[in-house]
Amino acid sequence: MICTNNAKIVLVIQNSTLQMTEGERVRKIRGIMTYADFSAPLGVGGSNISNIEKGRSRLSLELAIKIAQVYEVSLDWLLLDKGPQLLSEPKVEYNEAKMTFIDKDELIELQRLALKNTIKEKDKQIESLKNN
């Protein structure tokens, strides 16, 4: 189903069984890490990961096992797109000693100031474009 709203096109796929390629799954695991950062603990070069993501080469079983172990993802998901991606829920730890707490009114004021500054910046950009 395709919906249009204010010149934006949104494609909604319902009851889809589209599966990701193994390259797409590797890309999802890599996230915002560089190829070098992602590949270093795996003992391979960043170009190997790039080639897998782009479908130029296949993911070997040995590398898939390393990725699953290092990045704690399910091997079934990585190789077959079956089951959950993560082996377990990520552990989030909070150190209250390092946290700063503010009340609701202060938070609202901070949001208002941020929005006001954003509007000022956009107005400057618009004015600059008009003058050019």
Image (cartoon, rainbow, N blue to C red):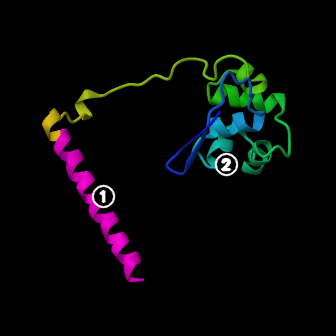
Tag 1, which secondary structure?
helix
Residue 91: x %, y % from top left: 46, 22
The magenta segment is 107-132
Image quadrant where residue 41 sits:
top right
Disc on res. 76: none
Tag 2, which secondary structure?
helix
Residue 96: x %, y % from top left: 25, 28
Residue 10: x %, y % from top left: 59, 41
Label 2 amino acid?
Answer: Tyr
Tag 2: Cα neighbours inside 10 Å, few (<14), some, or many (≥20)? some
Image quadrant where residue 86 sits:
top right
**Mark 1 or mark 2, which has the lower sequence index?**
2
Q: Which residue is under mark 1? A: 118
- How many numbered callouts? 2
Disc on res. 35: 2
Taking the magenta stretch, the answer to whether it contains residue 110 is yes
Label 1 amino acid?
Answer: Thr
Taking the magenta stretch, the answer to whether it contains residue 109 is yes
In the foreground, 14 or 17:
14
Q: Is residue 83 above or below residue 121?
A: above
Left of 91 or right of it: where is 73?
Answer: right
| C-alpha gap between disc 1 and disc 2 | 34 Å
In this view, the residue farthest toward the bottom is 132
Left of 55 or right of it: where is 101?
Answer: left
